[in-house]
Structures are given as structure tokens and as C-alpha cells.
Image: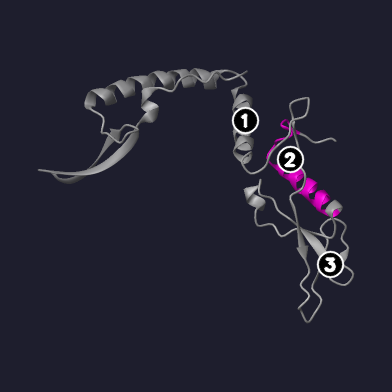
Amino acid sequence: MPINKEKRSFYHDIAPLRLTVEGHYGKKEVLAFRDKEGLVLTKEEVIEARKEFLKDIEKAAEFYAVPGMEEVIRKENIKKSIASLSFLIEFQKKENGKLMIPDANLKQLHFKTNLKRDWNFTCGGCGQKTSRKGNKHYYGIDFPCLPSLYHSAERACSVECGQHIWNEVLRNWIYENDYQDVFALHL
């Protein structure tokens, strides 16, 4: 069921303003409202906003009462989550409308030659031990599209292994977040 996004009501543009007032009763914290320009609303404006808000609460109750709304909400939230990532990574759509897993974001790194000992690591793709003996460089995998993996220290011995790690991590992320409906997982 598509959601029709109507024009926002007046009360959506108001924000609470906490104030401390002093009177014959002493100091007391009170709450007022201000509009998007920062001007404090009059009593009449607050009463009008309250009426609009209560009408919208009734409409919202009807929305949540419709069978299957949990699934609509879930899908809308997935769209929003993916859209928020689109400024970090460009997702391509397939013909069926699903998003493709993007190419790996690999960074070629060079082994340091000024070390007394050979630094090495085990490739996250093939499990092969990799060092500067016989290799000039290796690959770091960056996950800018996944804030939870942003500081990941995945390393690969080759572009192919880097792509494999990238695909595996993204597939796990897709399944963990229940995004299978959004991404094309089969090539």
C-alpha cells in the first residue's frame, strides 16, 4: 500500500521552548512553543495547533489499525535507511527495481620497506598469509556505506579477495537488517 504524503500541518513547524518564570509562587519551569522562525506562539495559535494535532492523531490511529501496516512501515523505514546511505555510495538498480551490491571500495596499500621485521597478515578472502616478501602491496577494504563497519580493518591479498570480502560483509549486513527485498542478491 503506497503512502500518500500530504502537506505537513502547521504544528509540525513548532518546537517546545522551556522557560523559567518567577512569580509570587517562586521560580517555576514552564513550556511555551515557537514557530520555525523562533517566534513564540500566541495562546490562540497553540490552541489551533492542538486541534490540528488531535485530528492527525485520530488519522494516525486509523492508519495503525489497518491490517498489514507493520509491513508498510517496515518497507518505508528500509527505503529511508537506504536513501540515507546513498550520499556515501551509489546504488545501481536492476531491471526488477532491486538494488545491486556495489563494487568493492578497495584501497591499494604498500608494504613498508623500512621495518626490521616483515609485517604480514592473513588474507580475509583466501586465508593466505601475505607479507612484503614477494608482494609490493595489499588491499584495504573500506565500508563507508555502513557506519557500523566504518572502522573495519579488513585486508586482502588481491582485488579478487577484496571483492569477495566486500560482497560477504554486505550480504551479511543485508540479512542482519532484513533488506533482502531491497537488494538483488543473486548475480
Q: Is residue 71 positioned above or below 166 on the image? A: above
Residue at image coords 62%, 24%: 72
Foreground disc of the pair 3, 2:
3
Callout 3 crowding tier (Cα within 10 Å): few <14, some 14–19, many ≥20: few
In the image as oriented, which residue stretches furthest toward the bottom?
116
Q: Give the labeled residue for mark 1.
A: 74
Residue shown at the point (78%, 69%) measured from the top left: 111
Picture coordinates of residue 152 (x, y %)? 69, 57
Query: x, y (%) of residue 138?
Result: 81, 62
- Three-letter code for the amino acid on which mark 1 is drawn: Arg
Q: Is residue 82 above or below residue 148?
A: above
Nearest to the observer: residue 65 or residue 165 = 165
Quickly name the residue at label 3.
136
Contact flag, marks 1 and 2 (Cβ < 8 Å) = no
Q: Where is the N terminus found, in terms of image quarters?
A: top right
Identify residue for label 2.
175
Q: CA distance from mark 3 to mark 1?
A: 47 Å
Q: Residue at x 87, y 60 (%)?
A: 127
Disc tally is 3
Quadrant holding the C terminus: top right
Question: Left or right: 49 with respect to 92?
Answer: left
Specify start and end residues of the magenta stretch as a single range: 161-183
The kind of residue tagged 2 is Tyr
Residue at the image position 84 percent from the left and 71 percent from the top = 132
Q: Is residue 3 magenta?
A: no
- The quarter holding residue 179 reads top right
| Between discs 3 and 2, the one toward the N terminus | 3
